[in-house]
Image (cartoon, rainbow, N blue to C red):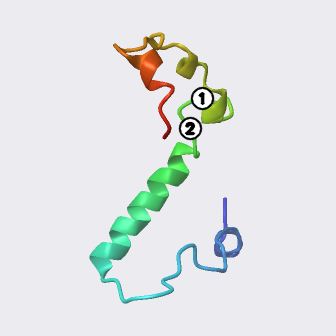
């Protein structure tokens, strides 16, 4: 059995959401509350990929490409000044 005092003690004394700027109407506040509640219910789970992000410099897929082949006259053109 719980009393009213126990219920009040379990509730937070500070609001969970606070509007800092603007004047949202009741519909907008309800939408915001629904989004925050759904995120809290999901537990902040990610997609399960816990591997750290790698730098694009370390991407080995960049090494897998077709070899560079010189075009016609490429050797002669390599002597030109740029």
Q: Which residue has dot 2 on it?
A: 46
CA separation, marks 2 and 1?
7 Å
Give 38 or 47, whichever is nearer the viewer.
47
Give 62 or 76, whichever is nearer the viewer.
76
Q: Marks 2 and 1: which is nearer the front?
A: 1
Whole-percent x, y for residue 21 in the image? 45, 88
Query: Against 77, is 30 above or below?
Result: below
Q: Which residue has dot 1 on it?
A: 49
Please report contact status of discs 2 and 1: CB closer than 8 Å, yes or no.
yes
Query: Against 5, is 72 above or below?
Result: above
* Residue 61 visible in the displayed image: yes
Quarter of the image with the N terminus in it: bottom right
Q: Taking 43 as reference, is 35 left or right?
A: left
Query: Against 37, is 43 above or below?
Result: above
Q: Quadrant of residue 70?
A: top left
Q: Quadrant of residue 71?
A: top left
Whole-percent x, y for residue 55 in the image? 65, 36
């Amino acid at each position: 059995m719980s009393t009213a005092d126990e219920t009040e003690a379990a509730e937070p004394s500070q609001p969970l959401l606070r509007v800092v700027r603007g004047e949202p109407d009741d519909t907008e506040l309800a939408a915001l509350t629904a989004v925050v509640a759904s995120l809290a219910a999901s537990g902040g789970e990610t997609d399960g990929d816990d591997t750290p992000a790698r730098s694009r410099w370390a991407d080995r897929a960049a090494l897998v490409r077709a070899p560079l082949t010189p075009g016609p006259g490429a050797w002669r053109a390599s002597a030109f000044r740029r």
